[in-house]
Amino acid sequence: MASLTKNPDYALKHTDPGTGFGLLYSEKLNDCVFVNPLAAALWRAPVDEIDPERDGAVFERVFGLAGGADYLRQVVRDMSARGVLADRDGPDGDHLSAAGSSAPPAPVGGPFEDGLTPPLEQIYFYATRDCNARCYHCYQPTFTVKDRSGDLSQSQIDAGTFLDLLRAALPLGLRAVKITGGEPLLRPDLRVIIEGVRRLGLAVSMETNAFLLDEDMADFLTAKEVDVSISLDGGSAEVHDSLRGLPGSFDRATRALELLAARGRDPKAIMAISRRNLADVEKVLAVVKSRGCDRVKFNPVNSLGVAGRLRKTNVLLEVGEIMDLYARRAELEADHGVFLFLEGPPSFATVFETVTGHSAVCPFAKILGILADGSISYCGVGNSCPELIFGKVTAEGFDIGDFWRTAEALVHSREVCGGLLEGVCGQCVLVSYCRGSCRALAYGELGSFAAPHPFCQTAYERGLFPSHYLRGR
């Protein structure tokens, strides 16, 4: 492997004090690359040239690591693949992607030749607007029902129509389907849908309150390898049931965690956090762990959609309280033996947390939301914002391939989100990675897909935004 030189367009913008993970940034290219401690150390070396053979041998000898030379070469290849190192003697044909750069490399090839249309990687299916709970924080306009109906509502597309859509979307790059609601377990044909999704070779996940998840359903979900997320908003029945408006839901949710864990699955608990249950954070973690599970997601309650009524209350967390959760993440994770994921912009996380999956990036440009009646939106935001519905899968002559490439709403949103975002997002070095995170929340709060993420903008205005992620700082 030939010697390489550092790309002068990039500089080491930030290094985590505790972990050594770093962020390379190019102002010229508006590009950020996350690197592990070894890659960051190589970049800090006072020479521009890196000789993988020489430096690998030194690294292995000095640190006494068996295989250390191979590891360093692998890191260097990955940095080269991301464009932050250049081969002096021409391209190195053998690019490995593993340890050096933790941001995914730019797409190569794929189903489209225009270079502008992203792959349609995921479909979010809002399978029903029926729900057996009445959660105070829900942003979706749902209909309260007590139990399953024996028949499919006339306002819902049937399993065959949905599965035909998925089949047609496979050439667009489709890899996964997320099923949510409402409460998806209320659909009488849910098993048919899941079986069809799996036959197409797609991964499937489901979000549920788990009230109807019994042993038989646990067996089915396990057999079909469904990644299940279960709502758990309190560490006791008193707290959880009151927030969910569904007596007995705490016992059902925790029992569902046990059922899936006992079958070798690893369900995720999702806690919608506000000031009404912030004090229950550690209790929830303890409950999850006691049920044999170790994945938890904290999801700060927001005011999107019908939850806009919460803006006039003292329920929503202040941005400082959200940032405090990020600051406590590692300690909470260590104390309770769980993997803790926080829903929110990566600007509040460390580089290590970003590259290890503890914070999120919304795949806004690579998803479609299919609503229960077959309407199409960017995600579930269409249920709350009808003006963001821009198609229907049951329309005569509908073609998902043509729609994904040419629908005016999609083309416009790609142009907006691919350009310079407003507010602090336009000043943040992470924007090329996160693209402003949740665009639905930006639209709901500030009326534009180009608007900054509300959490980030508020933090910036209050002097709380991490300065090491700002350009020119």
Image: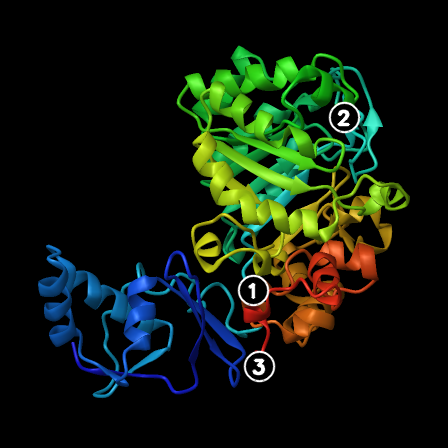
Q: Secondary structure at mark 1?
A: loop
**Label 1 crowd (10 A; few <14 / some 14-19 / many >=20):** some
State the image quarter where residue 155 is shown. Answer: top right
**Label 2 crowd (10 A; few <14 / some 14-19 / many >=20):** many
Q: Which of label 3 and label 1 is nearer to you?
A: 3
Residue 263 to residue 358: above or below: above
413 vs 328, nearest the viewer: 328
> Residue 154 has which mark?
none
Q: Position of residue 88 (x, y in %)?
A: 24, 88
State the image quarter where residue 371 is shown. Answer: top right
Q: Quadrant of the N terminus?
A: bottom left
Of pointers 3 and 1, the one earlier in the residue sequence:
1
The structure residue drawn at horizontal position 69% and vertical position 61%, both measured from the top left corner, is 456
Mark 2–mark 1 Cα distance, whole angstroms, equals: 39 Å
- Left or right: 45 as drawn, with respect to 392: left
Residue 346 to residue 148: above or below: below
**Label 3 crowd (10 A; few <14 / some 14-19 / many >=20):** few
Amino acid type at image mark 1: Pro
| Residue at numbered disc 2 | 243
- Left or right: 388 as drawn, with respect to 211: right
Amino acid type at image mark 3: Gly
Q: Which of label 2 and label 3 is nearer to you?
A: 3
Q: Quadrant of the C terminus?
A: bottom right
Of pointers 2 and 3, the one earlier in the residue sequence:
2
Mark 2–mark 3 Cα distance, whole angstroms, equals: 44 Å
21 vs 107, nearest the viewer: 21
| Residue at numbered disc 1 | 118
Q: Secondary structure at mark 2?
A: helix
Of pointers 2 and 1, the one earlier in the residue sequence:
1
